[in-house]
């Protein structure tokens, strides 16, 4: 834990500050569009044409796409060790989440349990973010 | 890879943060190089070599 605390206490670089500021902004917009979209789809937009409902449903994914863009910019700005840590964390978390969903898919095919396709798809990205946090912590520890 | 970066930094009387600023990297990177947990890229190794005015092979060596 001490190592993690040390990493957190390091002053943020300009790239990290910029990335964090944009990330907070994007996630605020995401929460707003997510709740707005759900409320509209369950309320007044229930009778809208399918194409409009589709646009409304996909709207919360736009700020998440923006997070992807700012993450790539951040990777280009940070120094080589930080970039290595980030890429190791992203690579390992993608592998873990991919394997988890592959195993879950096999289990569902075998009839062990059942979940709706929409539920499964929605949880991919949040799980990826959560596991990324864990794998980044592990990568930071390795280089301290 | 063996590194003499800590020894050289001490000789120059710089803190890790000062060296990081001069190399334009994070303090975390300097620390990882000094503790030999991270081998710098060729580009960064050349930068370190120029800063300490020493050839790369006298700063870094194989285990």
Image (spheres, coloured by chain):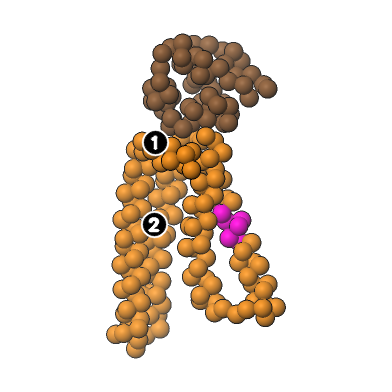
What residue does disc 2 label?
Answer: A66
User: How many residues crowd mark 1 within 10 Å: few (<14), some (14–19), many (20+)?
Assistant: few
Residue A59 can be seen, yes or no: yes
**Horizontal and vertical percent for residue A50?**
40, 83
Secondary structure of the residue carrying tag 2 is helix
The residue positioned 46% from the left and 16% from the top of the image is B9
| Relative horizontal placement of residue B37, taking residue A26 as reference (left or right) | right
What residue does disc 1 label?
Answer: A10
C-alpha span from label 1 to label 2: 26 Å
Labels 1, 2: front one: 1
Q: Name the quadrant of the C terminus of chain B.
A: top right
Q: Using the image, name the chain to which the residue with label 1 belongs.
A: A
Tell which residue pokes out farthest to the right in this image: A110
Instruction: Please give the letter of the chain rendered in orange.
Output: A
Q: Splitting the image into 4 quarters, where does residue A63 fall? A: bottom left
The residue positioned 38% from the left and 22% from the top of the image is B18
Q: Name the quadrant of the N terminus of chain B.
A: top right
Tell which circle, 1 or 2, labels the residue nearer the N-terminal end: 1
**Horizontal and vertical percent for residue A12?**
36, 38
Q: Using the image, name the chain to which the residue with label 2 belongs.
A: A
Q: What is the magenta range?
A: A93-98
Camera-nearest residue between B61 and A74 = B61
The residue positioned 38% from the left and 38% from the top of the image is A9
| Residue A97 included in the magenta stretch of the image | yes
């Amino acid at each position: 834990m001490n190592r993690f605390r040390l990493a957190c206490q390091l002053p943020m670089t300009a790239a990290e500050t910029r990335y964090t500021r944009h990330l907070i902004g994007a996630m605020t917009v995401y929460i707003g569009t997510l709740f707005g979209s759900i409320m509209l789809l369950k309320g007044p937009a229930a009778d809208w044409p399918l194409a409009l409902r589709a646009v409304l449903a996909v709207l919360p994914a736009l700020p998440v796409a923006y997070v992807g863009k700012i993450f790539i910019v951040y990777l280009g700005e940070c120094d080589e060790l930080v970039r290595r840590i980030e890429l190791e964390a992203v690579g390992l978390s993608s592998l873990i989440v991919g394997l988890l969903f592959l195993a879950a898919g096999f289990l569902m095919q075998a009839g062990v349990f059942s979940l709706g396709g929409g539920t499964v798809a929605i949880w991919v990205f949040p799980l990826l973010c959560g596991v990324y946090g864990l794998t980044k912590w592990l990568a930071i520890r390795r280089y301290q | 890879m063996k590194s003499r970066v800590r020894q050289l930094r001490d000789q120059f009387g710089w803190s890790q943060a000062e060296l990081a600023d001069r190399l334009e990297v994070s303090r975390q990177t300097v620390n990882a190089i000094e503790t030999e947990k991270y081998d710098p890229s060729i580009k960064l190794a050349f930068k370190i070599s120029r800063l300490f005015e020493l050839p790369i092979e006298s700063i870094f060596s194989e285990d």
